[in-house]
Amino acid sequence: MSARPLPAGSPAAQGVDATGVHAFLDALEAAPDIEPHSLMIMRHGHLVASGWWAPYTFDRPHLLYSLSKSFTATAAGIAAGEGLLRFDDPVISYFPEFDADITDPRSRAMLVRHVASMASGHEAETLDRALATDRADLVRGFLLLPPEREPGTVFAYNQPTTYTLAAIVQRVTGQPLTEYLRPRLLDPLGMGEAAWLRDRAGRELGFSGLHATTDAIARLGQLYLQDGVWEGRRLLPEGWVAEATRPHIGNGDGTAAGALSDWQQGYGLQFWTSRHGYRGDGAYGQFCLVLPGHDAVIATTAATERMQQVLDLAWQHLLPAFGPEPLLDREQEDTALRERLTRLALPPAAGKPAPPERAQEWSGAGFTPYGGVCVEQPKLTGAGVIRGTDGWALHLTEDGHEFALQVGAGGWTVTDEPLPTAVSGGWADDDTLAVDVLFLETPHRLTVTCSLPDRTFTARWHTTPLHSPPLRALRAPRASA
């Protein structure tokens, strides 16, 4: 289903000062530990700014990590509105096959709303322990771990709670999350492609793994800002938005520093309360910021461990840019911003062409991990440099699988097969090849460095993929569109 473009408007017409957006972009690009990938800003229902840092593009899905949770909650809210589940039911009632196994009274008292609000009674993340308890079924492994506190009394960010919520939705609907959401949310909003990673049991993960575009993030945020109504049609049950986005459990530590943290303002139903508005967010800077007080939505993707800094910069520069009235005589400023947004780009890694006097030595050279093992990607066992008719290529071997990356062409070399990647870099000197690889459907960049004298290589992640996937898995699965 082709998506109807979001209504567009100039920043000034929607009361947005373009200089504030410029300042936000300046701050993002000046921060050494933030690699921005995309930005979309909605104001008064209009798209007033959008840009992608090349080689990232508007139509490419991006791994959302835990921003996936907000889509899972949305599916649960729709299912509840259809009478398929109730948030005040015990979780165990949806898994009768585990009834005899789950004997702890706190586990049996856990309600659907408790897992939806990260308030299962556990005091810490349980993912590793739950998998160790039952690798075949994470729900059973989770329910077999007795909570330390009464459900509903303590917050702990805990992946199996969301997985369990997603499993309930998939059980009562008889469909994967994406199939259930396709006619109810994805298509009506015009979200286009969306694909969710599955576990070995065949369930879509729920807590992570959704790949979708920045445009899809913006549309979800706008739907919530509009109380679940889209183009005059109610897509979310009446009252759901208020229920999902209010704090259900406190998570602050009571300190002055905690008051300045956007992760200590309370937690809703798979949405965080922010210092301003509320949000869905995912590891390394995937954000859907909904600001009802400013009638605005900000959608971003990025690669950074400084997620609080991204929010601080948004509060510092974007909030003051949202004025109460349209701005007059700002055509020049709006045009300058629009032109800048079309030119956004990540600088390619530095590198020189292959040294002519050493080309014969480099061509066909093989490399093994420095120190015997590639610490940051242990199954990456070999690298090779080959000169072919199309130029130079770096071949990586991981767990018996090999793929080639074109290098030394200047700028970013983008390819979709066998993996969606962009490659830049080249020779740092006669003895050293250094290549950056962007996995374009994820927030991840890998730097591979080969040393000719000792025939070894290193590989270093700039942001490390969670859950240690093989390189060939760093792409969206087949889309549901």
Image (cartoon, rainbow, N blue to C red):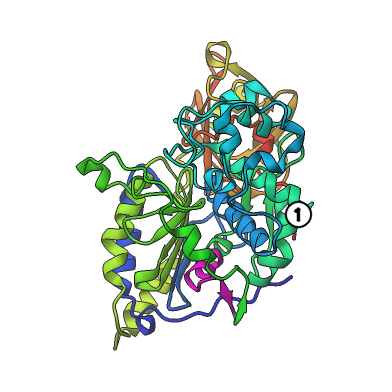
From the viewer's perspective, tell me whether residue 98 is left or right of residue 112: right
The front one of 70 and 393 is 70
Give the residue displayed 74% in from the left and 70% down from the top: 1
Residue 381: within the magenta? no
- For label 1, the residue is 173
Q: Who's the residue at 34% across and 70% down the image?
A: 293
Q: Quadrant of residue 395?
A: top right
Is 434 placed above or below 74 here?
A: above
Q: Position of residue 235 (x, y in %)?
A: 63, 71
On the rendered structure, is 254 left or right of 75?
left
**Residue 375 location (% of width, % of height):** 53, 19
In this orientation, does residue 380 appear? no
Foreground of the two, 104 or 350: 104
Is 433 above or below relative to 35?
above
Question: Which amino acid, mark 1?
Answer: Thr
Q: Between residue 135 and residue 152, name the one nearer to us.
A: 152
At x 56%, y 71%, the residue is: 238
Q: Going by the image, does 280 lie left or right of 478?
A: left
At mark 1, the secondary structure is helix
In this rendering, position of residue 332 left or right of residue 8 = left
| Residue 384 % position (x, y) | 65, 25
For the record, the magenta segment spans 219-230
Is residue 226 on the magenta stretch? yes
The outermost residue toward the front is 105
Residue 203 seen in the figure = yes
